[in-house]
Image (tube, rainbow, N blue to C red):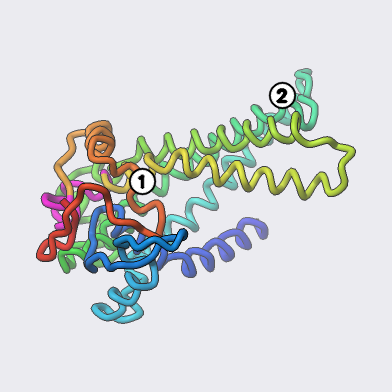
Amino acid sequence: MADTCGQVLLGSGLTVLSHPLMYIKVLIQVGHEPLAPTLGRNLFGRQVYQLPGLFAYAKHIIKIDGKAGLFKGLGPRLCAGSIGTIVHSKVLQKCQEEGTLQVLGGQQKAAEGSLQHVVNETTKEMVARSCATIVTHPFHVITLRCMVQFIGRETKYSGVFDSIVTIYREEGMLGFFAGLIPRLLCDVLSLWICNLLAHAINTYAIDDSMSHTGEIKNCSQAVTGFFASMLTYPFVLVSNLMAVNNCGLAGGLPPYASVYPTWVDCWRHLSREGNMSRGNSLFFRKLPAGKMYAVDQQRFF
């Protein structure tokens, strides 16, 4: 219990610190570009038109809403983080206990570091993460909608309890789980890609006789995690867009977004427009090829 409380406190602190980054990323993901492109230089020194990065976007938000404006949607996000940590911890503990009972019942325990061991541990982690994601997704939806209100200056989602009532009244129970499927797919795929790829590197590319083997294996886990997050980013984008799509906010309606019947339609539309990586980077954002900037609508078309 003490470990779980510590994880909740640490997670809450990191959530507060990282919230402005997520806020800006979400606004970029839905296509809100309040600042016109400027002429700058890329990494190779060539002149190109660039979109405003993290700091310019943050200054724009502060200019309109003050510094507190950078923390819109923080309340439901903290709820999601705290509840998710507790659910993840409890489910993972239950899975570990089930595994111990199976060993005591006569099943052979997989050797540490073997492929079977990696599969077993990844499966337990997948179940725990999936349960946490499903339980906390309603708070995630509320968080995103609180953020996207910046575009149309709405106040429809003003608090956790008021937002719950609003969503239930307008969309029913399904409204709380908008965008859940691509988010679950992202969690599952990134976990398996990360763990299996790290296992392959640690088994076939790293010699146990090498010095600092433990540090190298930890580094490989971090690298594969980053690689997995890049591969699964489109699922994150589609999930966030579906969470705010057609919910009555300007950021989820035309001209910012079409009304998508399913997340697959959203995926196809983004793929066709070449926007599958929109919002992936907060720095060195180049002007999308073949796009024009609409000053009055503050977006590209």
Are the residues tagged 1 and 2 within 8 Å (C-beta)? no
Asked which secondary structure carries label 2, the reply is helix
Q: Quadrant of the N terminus?
A: bottom right
Q: How far from the left and from the top, in percent, is residue 267? A: 28, 35
Instruction: Report the disc number at residue 277.
Output: 1
Residue at 29% x, 44% y is: 275
| Residue 160 visible within the image | no
Residue at 71% x, 47% y is: 218
Q: How far from the left and from the top, in percent, is residue 78? A: 44, 62
Who comes first in sequence, dot 1 or dot 2?
2
Q: How far from the left and from the top, in percent, is residue 213? A: 82, 44
Q: How far from the left and from the top, in percent, is residue 248? A: 13, 53
Q: Amino acid at mark 2?
A: Gln
Q: Amino acid at mark 1?
A: Ser
186 shown above or below 292: above
Locate residue 263: give its quadrant.
top left
Magenta residue span: 242-256
Mark 1 or 2, closer to the camera? 1
Q: Nearer the viewer, residue 123 or 31?
A: 31
Residue at 41% x, 49% y is: 136
Residue at 53% x, 34% y is: 127
250 sits to left or right of 66: left
Q: Nearer the viewer, residue 161 or 194?
A: 194
Chief secondary structure of the magenta span? loop
Q: Nearer the viewer, residue 275 or 180?
A: 275
| Pointer 2 residue | 102
